[in-house]
Image (cartoon, rainbow, N blue to C red):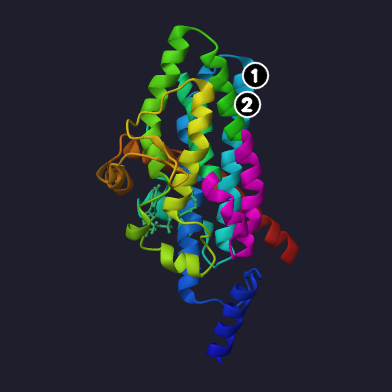
Amino acid sequence: TPEARLDSFEDKLAADVKIEPRDAMPDAYRKTLIRQISQHAHSEIVGMLPEGNWITRAPTLKRKAILLAKVQDEGGHGLYLYAAAETLGISRDEMIDALLEGRAKYSSIFNYPTLSWADIGVIGWLVDGAAIMNQVPLCRCSYGPYARAMVRVCKEESFHQRQGYDALVAMMQGSEAQRAMVQESVNRWWWPVLMMFGPHDKDSVHSETSMKWGIKRISNDELRQKFVDATVPQAEVLGITLPDPDLKWNAERGHYDFGAIDWNEFWQVVNGNGPCNRERMAARVKAHEDGAWVREAARVHAEKQAARAAA
Ligand code: ACO
């Protein structure tokens, strides 16, 4: 009976046994995973654009090789994640159409421009740092294929975070102009990075069910706080000021207090009106159109192979 199958889903959750693609699962669990994993995949793919912008202008051969590898890793993450979502019964074409038609979300952070070389370091340090904070708990997500994809993704993200911090350390040991470039970049990215964790818990529509189902293990606000607590000492080592006059240690809470996030800006960006939303979507649409001949060639080749096998 359907109830018996639901019981076994809940038994598995209670026992912390991973849910696998062929297991029974509530339709809403399947839907929310498709939503989250496809948004995550789109974020990785769109996330290649802001950094790709600097590949031709990296200051040294070493920095260029690192940046190329990192942007390729992000493409790889997108592909693992599309594959993980496909195990839930949606096709890659459907997901990509949703992105290109503007029906799918992707992380707000990738709608901001990369204006200086320092932005590449700051994206590694702060954007990838925030991504790791959010993704490490996803390695324990109840859905097997997503959890396993996250293990490799997190290892690569850790390298991304370190390379960003390393680039910033080098710049901070350079000239006054380089230090000013890093500070200006941190000033622009800090608040959008805090928004990456999503709305406050009380405004997060999916949190309660996603926590119940073991998809989310730690809430948006808790992850944001952990990120701030981890980042403040790193900023001190770098010699950077974080642009928040309300940021200060609260001994009673054992955490840093920080200022109010501009949620109006967040929703503007999520709803398509950020500084680069149109540019990002136009770049993805063009890439998809430019790749049409590859899809066509692959289709014709597969047909020929099938016809040969049938003959
Ligand atoms: N950017 C864009 N949309 C966001 C963001 C954000 N930073 N944060 C939340 N939202 C959206 C949610 O997708 C949801 O919209 P939907 O109902 O249309 O799907 C809505 O705002 C409400 O948010 P929540 O109820 O809090 O949504 P959820 O429980 O899914 O939590 C979160 C959001 C934390 C982003 C979660 O989906 C998650 O952990 N995703 C996986 C990680 C990820 O996608 N990272 C991408 C950036 S990191 C990188 O690629 C380098």
Query: Which of the 4 quarters of the picture holds residue 22?
Result: bottom right
Q: Position of residue 220 (x, y in %)?
A: 43, 53
Task: Reply yes or no: does residue 154 show up in magenta.
Answer: yes
Residue 6: image quadrant is: bottom right
Please count the marks in the image: 2
Q: Are marks 1 and 2 in contact (CB under 8 Å)?
A: yes
Residue highlighted by disc 1: 62
Residue 266 seen anywhere in this rendered image of the structure: yes
Q: Name the kind of residue labelled 1 in the image.
A: Lys
Q: Which residues are magenta?
A: 133-159
Against 116, residue 128 (above or below) is below
Image vertical order of residue 232 relative to residue 40, above or below: above
**Looking at this view, is 85 or 228 the one in front?**
228
| 103 to the left or right of 134 | left
Local packing at callout 2 (Cα closer than 10 Å; few below 14, some 14-19, many 20+) is some
| Res 76 → quadrant | top right
Image x and y of residue 138, in percent: 57, 55
- Quick one: quadrant of the N terminus? bottom right
Give the Cα separation between the discs numbered 1 and 2. 6 Å
Instruction: State the residue lying farthest toward the bottom.
Output: 1
Q: Tell me the element at label 1.
A: helix
Name the amino acid type tagged 2: Ile
